[in-house]
Image: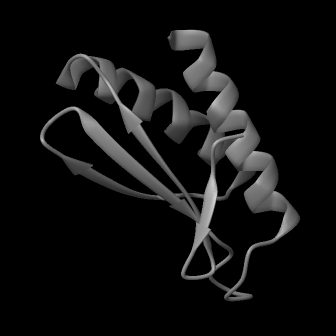
Amino acid sequence: MSWKIENNRLCRDFDFKTQTDLANFLVLVAKKADAVNHHPDATISKCSHLRLDLFTHTANKIMDLDRELAQSISDIYNDLV
């Protein structure tokens, strides 16, 4: 995984060719997040750059579910590129 830990969160940046590619990826991430009832914080910049941050808000730390979702998100991204 190319996730890093910053401010007690798992973080990863993703770059896409187009805004549409980013949006399509984010929909897939949202569907997976809904399925496990755990949602990343997402920040979009320059229309094709996405940053995702994962941590368990209720515990205020990184938990196994964060790592599992991060792996799933990486798998989704790897399938697209």
Q: Is residue 5 left or right of residue 68?
A: left
Question: Which quarter shows the N terminus?
Answer: top right
Of 24 and 61, the residue lying toward us: 61
Q: How many marks?
A: 0
Q: Residue at x 82, y 71 (%)?
A: 63
Of 56 and 67, the residue lying toward us: 67
Q: Quadrant of residue 73?
A: top right
Q: Residue at x 72, y 35 (%)?
A: 72
Q: Residue at x 74, y 88 (%)?
A: 59
Q: Residue at x 68, y 75 (%)?
A: 56
Residue 52 % position (x, y): 47, 53
Residue 33 % position (x, y): 62, 46
Q: Is residue 19 left or right of residue 24?
A: left
Q: Is residue 17 left or right of residue 5?
A: left
> Image height check: is 81 above or below 32?
above
> Image height check: is 37 above or below 26?
below
> Image height check: is 63 above or below 25?
below
Residue 36 % position (x, y): 74, 49
Q: Residue furthest left?
A: 46
Of 40 and 16, the residue lying toward us: 16
Q: Is residue 14 left or right of residue 47?
A: right
